[in-house]
Image: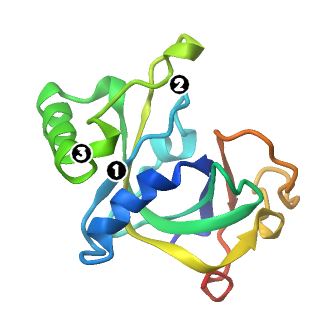
Amino acid sequence: MRPMALFLNGVFEAVLKEVRLVQDILPEHIMFLQPHKGEAIAKLREDPPSVDDPMLLLMSLTDDLPNVCYVAEIVGWDDKRAMAPRKWHMISRLIWILQPKEGGLYNASHAEGKESVNLLHVRRLRKLATRVSVTKLMNVGDGQPLSDGRTTSGGWIYVKAPSPRGLR
């Protein structure tokens, strides 16, 4: 696992529950998350994770922003704007079948006047038995703990990957 993790701020729990319906039975089955922002997650674009070199994903929920509630492994990344039509069609079909509430691949950034960019390929999604305060996460940019005063969902930040013992 990489020494850096990605923290997503405010994911809809309904999306994660759909992923868990499959991954609770088949944890290695790759599923998809579509952050809404209209900009690329730069470090994933520059050095995409893989099944052999995953990146830890930490997530708070839209109704519990100050706490990490779910973790997963990112094992792939795509720029939705640059996907070949066949790949777009195939992944969209998979999402329609396995994550029907997602409605296939979509563009949720129209309000920002941009296109949705990021498609995360994830495995081993699990809900933490004990939530972890985001203040326990260290921003890799400035070495400071994250603030728990979050009031708005959306966005991401790179953090130092916490010890697996801290994520139970």
Give 31 or 66, whichever is nearer the viewer: 66
Q: Quadrant of residue 27?
A: bottom left
Q: Quadrant of residue 61?
A: bottom right
Instruction: Measure how far apart labels 1 and 3 are at the Cα level.
Output: 7 Å
Q: Quadrant of residue 54?
A: bottom left
Q: Which residue is mark 1?
A: 32
Mark 2 or 3, which is nearer the eye?
Answer: 3
Q: Position of residue 5 (x, y in %)?
A: 60, 62
Q: Which residue is mark 3?
A: 95
Q: Position of residue 112 (x, y in %)?
A: 59, 15
- The crowd level at tag 3 (other Cα within 10 Å; few <14, some 14-19, many 20+) is many
- The crowd level at tag 2 (other Cα within 10 Å; few <14, some 14-19, many 20+) is some
Q: Position of residue 142 (x, y in %)?
A: 85, 52
Q: Quadrant of the C terminus?
A: bottom right
Instruction: Measure how far apart labels 2 and 3 are at the Cα level.
Output: 20 Å
Badge 2 or badge 3: first in the primary sequence: 2
Badge 1 or badge 3: first in the primary sequence: 1
Numbered disc 1: secondary structure: strand
Badge 2 or badge 1: first in the primary sequence: 1
167 relative to 136, above or below: below
Residue 71 as seen in the image, left or right of residue 63: left
Numbered disc 3: secondary structure: helix
- The crowd level at tag 1 (other Cα within 10 Å; few <14, some 14-19, many 20+) is many
Mark 1 or 3, which is nearer the eye?
Answer: 3
The residue depicted at 81 percent of the width and 47 percent of the height is 150
Kind of residue at badge 2: Gly
Residue that sits furthest to the top in the current view: 113
Residue 68 as seen in the image, left or right of residue 113: right
Is residue 94 something that shows in the picture? yes
Q: Which residue is mark 2?
A: 38
Q: How many marks?
A: 3
